[in-house]
Amino acid sequence: MALELRQQLKLTQQLVMTPQLQQAIKLLQLSRVELIETIDQELEINPVLEESESEDIPSSNDTDRSNSLQEEEPASYETQLPTLASSELEKIPWEDNAIQDINWKDFWDEDNRSSLPAYSFEKKEAPNYENLFTRTTDLREHLMWQLQMAHFNGMERRSACLIIGNLDRNGYLKTTIEEIAEEVECDPEKVEDVLKKVQLFDPVGVAARDLKECLLVQMDHLGINDPLVLELVSEHLNHIERHNYQAMAKATGQSLEEIAQAIEIITNLEPCPGRPFSSEEIQYIVPDIHVYKVDDEYIVALNDEDMPRLKISTFYRDTIKNGVATPSAKDFIQGKLKSALWLIRSIQQRQKTIYRVTKSIVEFQREFLDKGIAYLKPLILRDVADDIEMHESTISRVTTNKYVHTPQGIFELKFFFSASLGRDDGPDVASYSVKEQIRQMIQVENLTRPYSDKQIVEILAKDHIRIARRTVAKYRDLMGILPSSRRKRPAINYNLKKISD
């Protein structure tokens, strides 16, 4: 068989992921905080890019563009800026010569604002910043402050510091007395005495080694010395956890009414003393977009507050214009200029895409905005993608880590997309609505006869909602609701008089 070389022409199509397109995709899926961090990094490495420090009032041209945008068709501006739909990628002029078609007046010296409609609202709707920038005292600081006020000698103070330093987030001691005694070089009995003193610090029961010790310390401090309560805490915590009143009554030889009164006292104790001093910082959400109701219409407005406003440096413009730059410097400036322009255009496209997706979601979920979560409609990514003529992957990126402020509260855009459950007498219902029905149903149930998962299925079937028992169990677990056996209480006449009296 002879081998030979041949030349052959072949026509193929392939998607080329240019660096600029990769940057646009990356910016689209970033959260608000990540976008600000990315812009700050670009400002550091790109000298052509600057942040506008002045809060200029938008010009009349900007106002005209804002008004005209609402009248344009959804596809009217997609040819100007990069769109992430796979079917439209080849239409975008990503080549170097595309920079020649830029309207430079939009980038020189001007505050580069988005051309989307903006609305003015009263300042009283903004959060109180005094509540945003606060720091709470954690458990360790609270205990160390009390230690400074206590009368301890040197050895006791060192032991107390080691005890406080080895507490977990719930306030329990996670080391042994022997290890602390070895570190302080003293007898374990002396460390035990220090531990008992620390356990009486506020909150009482802190530094306990287990739940039983924690509850017993609190009972001793409060003067609760009823034998039945002591016996239940000392020997039957497993039955208390499972609400097994029958087993406790059989083991102690007491009636169900006496057991219930004892349990009522125990439930008033704090099983996690460190809970009020949680060191977790509250993460405040700044919405990317606001939805306001004006008259009978819902207005969608982007939240540009605290977002860096970018522009092109006039210094480098004059450098190129006056021809004072060397060829190598000119090439460097042009490269950085192209990078800066792509960043600005990508951010503009990101904002416009978020705007269009949110506006489409508002149209689909208008009944939810009017009446609440019970009226949330089933929605999938394809519904929004078909409505605004974009790809599903673009909708998925837009709705990730983006939050919207609505009259019903602040929600992630992903919240509005949920699975549907079949209904016999009408359209399907969203899973979030069913979860809300289950939660409200359990809130008003009779604790002596709580609803089982099967009974919940039967109740929902009366509303023509088809749902499986295992689905109810899954929804209940997601909402942190215990099964019916753990929610059940004995049918007795509760006496408000405390046993300790």
Image (cartoon, rainbow, N blue to C red):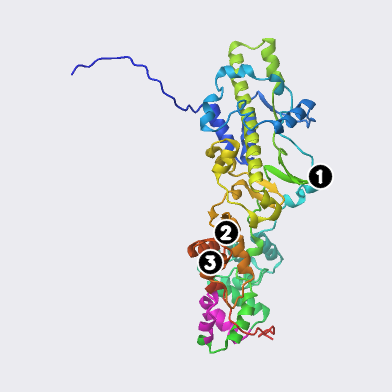
Disc 2, disc 1: CB below 8 Å?
A: no
**Secondary structure of residue under mark 1:** loop
Residue matched to label 2: 425
Q: Which residue is mark 3?
A: 457
Residue 192: image tag: none
Alpha-carbon span between mark 2 and mark 1 = 44 Å
Along the viewing direction, whichever of 94 and 383 lies nearer the viewer: 383
Pointer 3 or 2: first along the chain: 2
Give the distance between the C-alpha atoms of the residues marked 3 and 2, in whole angstroms: 17 Å
Q: Is 240 a magenta residue?
A: yes
- Residue 36's spot in the image, x, y percent? 65, 37
Is residue 435 rendered magenta in the image? no
- Categorize mark 3 by other alpha carbons within 10 Å: few (<14), some (14-19), many (20+): many
The residue pinned by badge 1 equals: 122
Placement of 370 over or under 67, stated as above or below: below
Secondary element type, mark 3: helix
The residue range painted magenta reads: 225-249
Q: Amino acid at mark 2?
A: Asp
Answer with the quarter of the image where residue 397 lies. top right
Q: In which quadrant of the rendered image does the N terminus lie?
A: top left
Q: What residue do we see at 75% from left, 31% from top?
A: 67
